[in-house]
Amino acid sequence: MPEQAPSPEPWLPPWFRHPTRLDLPTGHHLRPIRELDVDLDLPAVLGSRERLWSIYGRAWGWPPEGMTREQDRADLARHEAEIARHESFNYALFDDEEAELLGCVYLDPPGRAGADADVSWWVVDRLVGSGLESALDAEVPRWVDRDWPFTRPRFVGRDLSWEEWLALPVR
């Protein structure tokens, strides 16, 4: 995942408090990921690694081949700390019981010119093309519009491809 360099200007207004949950119409929900989610995150990532690499590999170098539990734990600890500092956000997609991690949603400061946030998401391989993925595709943009203070969010992998994103000028 991208390391977020400290920004000279705050990315989010000081009054903003990030959402702690988004309920989907499917009975699933999003909540901020935690280091303790490693034993649910690792199987989701490794089980979908080839597709995830095809999406995020060139831009983020993630997920690395042979990713270990310790590497994933450290990555999740970093995400949890970034969320606490409002530097970037990683929300995990769960069923009601939180027995399985089913995907993630990322909200990051824009890495390229032309937006005030870069938003992307994925579901595990077996859910590609499912009703849950369709619900996420519909709900995430509405959620960002309704609950986040962005005026120009960019939905990478949706509004433009990762190749198009990589071709934009670096901020």
Image (tube, rainbow, N blue to C red):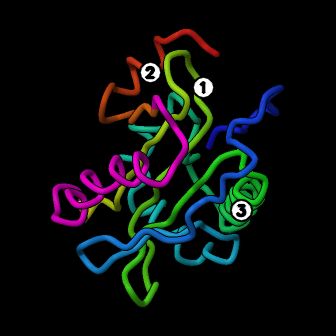
The magenta stretch is 128-152
Q: Which quadrant does the C terminus fall into?
A: top right
Disc nearer the start of the sequence (2/1):
1
Q: Residues within 10 Å of mark 3 (few under 14, many from 20)?
A: many
Q: Which residue is disc 2 drawn over?
A: 165
Q: Which residue is disc 1 drawn over?
A: 111
Callouts 3 and 2 close, C-beta under 8 Å: no
Label at residue 80: 3
Disc nearer the start of the sequence (3/1):
3
Amino acid type, callout 3:
Glu
Q: CA distance from mark 2 to mark 1?
A: 9 Å
Callouts 2 and 1 close, C-beta under 8 Å: yes
Q: Residues within 10 Å of mark 1 (few under 14, many from 20)?
A: many
Of helix, strand and loop, which one carries label 1?
A: loop
Q: Where residue 80 sits: x, y (%)?
A: 71, 62
Looking at the image, which residue is at 66% across and 59% down?
17
Q: 7 or 52, which lies in front? A: 7
Q: CA distance from mark 3 to mark 1?
A: 20 Å
Looking at the image, which residue is at 40% across and 45% down?
145
Disc nearer the start of the sequence (3/2):
3
Q: Which quadrant does the N terminus fall into?
A: top right
Of helix, strand and loop, which one carries label 3?
A: helix
Looking at the image, which residue is at 69% across and 36% down?
11
Q: Residue furthest bottom?
A: 97
Q: 167 or 84, which lies in front? A: 84
Tell me if 159 is positioned left or right of 109 in this view: left
Q: CA distance from mark 3 to mark 2?
A: 25 Å
Looking at the image, which residue is at 45% across and 73% down?
101
